[in-house]
Image (cartoon, coloured by chain):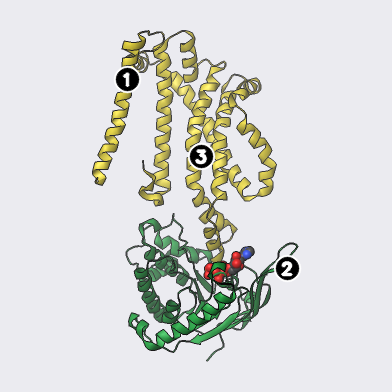
Chain colours: A green, B yellow
Amino acid sequence: MAGPVLELRNLNKEIPRPGKEPFQIFNNLNLSVREGEFVSIVGPSGCGKTTMLRVVNGLMPHSGGEILLDGKAADQVSDQLLMGFVFQGASLLPWRTSLKNVLLGLEGRGNNGQEAEQIAKKFLDLVGLNGFENHYPHELSGGMQQRVNLARALAVNPRILLMDEPFAALDAQTRSFMQLELLRIWAETKKTVIFVTHMIAEAVLLSDRVIVFSHRPGTIKSEFDIPLPRPRDMDIRSDPQFLHLENQIWKQIEQEVKAAGGFAQL
Amino acid sequence: MTEEQRNLVSILLRVGSVLTGLLGWHYLAVAVIKDPGILVSPVEVVSKAYEMMVTTGELYPHLFASSIIFFYGFVLAVLVGVPLGFVMALSPLVRDYVNPWMTTLYTAPRIAFAPILLLWFGIGAGSKVAIVFLGCVFPVLINSYYGMRVVNREYVELARSYRLDRWALFGKILLPASVPFILAGVRLAIGRGLTGVAIAEWFGATEGLGYLIFFAGQTLNVPTLFVGVAVFAALGIIGFEIVRRVEKFATPWRGQTQGS
Ligand SMILES: Nc1ncnc2c1ncn2[C@@H]1O[C@H](COP(=O)(O)OP(=O)(O)OP(=O)(O)O)[C@@H](O)[C@H]1O
Ligand SMILES: [Mg+2]
């Protein structure tokens, strides 16, 4: 098999503070993600998960280490649009219809016109929004908005899909539904996904591998392979192996929260 | 209440408000004050308006003169205010440079400028347009500036994430996000612009609605005075309605949340 799609080597991020030592957000991150792999990242609040995604996406510079995309330094890769970013808040532009929102990413690559529209429609179909092309965001439910968000990220045909707690704002039922939808879409598109979440069960349900971050400055505390068979459905949540993994991961996070000074510090 | 019932109540309240107001006015004029040198009944105002619009047609030259002044001052203010507001929002240097003057001009009472402008531009259209311009430009400028400053940071992040260049960021994110703010500024500008027309035509004008009111006041022609005021009010209402339609057309994405 080919080398990893994404490799982080000793990646650091710190923010300089005048008159003080720099504020370290994460430290010494080493991570390698395979083609088509679904990797989740969990960890205490404030440990730098969002910052890591932003750095990987090129929205922020790093302070040390390396980011390799297909073995090449990320800043050498001609266009970092190898990433699609799915935001926590759907971040849809309220003055654009679903279709136009999906088109935004394509416009960024100079892809306009008929062909772009065909692509956008295809991905709206894929996320199950056939018939909602001309709806404005305020006419869509929270779940539907997240579908548009996902379609927009997929439409640029990214090498890697970065997702930052995309379902956090949804109610429990919609959330479960969207998890299954994501599994279906992932199986269809075979994308490499890095998925940040607070919900351990969500991470276990979706992932091939779950990474636990330590408290800030974040480093990788432990990794769990999730060998549960696919395709998965909601029944798997009562599988003993599932529960065991969930429990183990929870213990890891609990240790970190305690080490950071308890919940009150979060 | 159903949607339909709510609409009905809303309409009834509005019509009722106008009717009771007019009735109250009529009663006040006819039964309480009883002095047509101070207050005349709306009936008389309407009949005077009819006379001025249909019988003699003497209203039109005034209406036309005022409209022209308003139009030039207002359009000029939008043409200057919107781009200047944008530039100030996007460049802190320009903002800091322009700010002291802007604050001074904005906070000083505009009527104080009228004689100066008259001195500079003479009593022709120039000075009047300048007064209207001064009234309109600040709400437009400040709202355009503000609209661009408060654009949701998420949208900017989104644009960067999808690698939109600077022009696309402006055209696809900042500009559309500012439109509702700009239109709110334009709405304010209409009222201030009409005030500007009235002020401008009080000083050395020979026609216009402001002149009409001023002259009617001097000659104690109370019905004409009221017609002038009513026409000003009507112009304001028409202006608001136009902005409302532009708003509906330009920002269909705001849906029903705006009310009417
Ligand atoms: N630009 C910045 N300047 C200063 N501090 C920052 C900046 N960005 C993030 N931080 C800080 O870095 C830490 C990590 O933030 P980040 O948002 O990455 O955490 P997170 O793991 O995503 O948290 P959560 O799970 O709550 O979303 C926080 O303490 C945050 O305040
Ligand atoms: Mg976060």
> Could you give the CA–CA distance between mark 1 and mark 2, rounded to whole angstroms?
74 Å
Between disc 1 and disc 3, the foreground one is 1
Q: Callout 3, which amino acid?
A: Gly
Crowdedness of circle 1 by 10 Å Cα count: few (<14), some, many (20+)? some
Q: Position of residue B36 (x, y in %)?
A: 37, 8
Q: Nearer the viewer, residue A258 or A37?
A: A258
Q: Amino acid at mark 2?
A: Glu
Ligand 1 has an atom within 8 Å of the beta carbon of the residue at disc 1: no
Chain ID at mark 3? B
Numbered label attached to residue B185: 3
Q: Chain of mark 1?
A: B
Earlier sequence position, callout 1 versus callout 3: 1
Q: Secondary structure at mark 2?
A: loop
Chain of the residue on which disc 2 is drawn: A
Q: Residue at x 73, y 68 (%)?
A: A21
Can you say whether A90 is above or below A215 in the image? Answer: above
Q: Position of residue B81 (x, y in %)?
A: 57, 39
**Residue beneath disc 2:** A21
**Residue at mark 1:** B24
Of labels 3 and 2, the one closer to you: 2
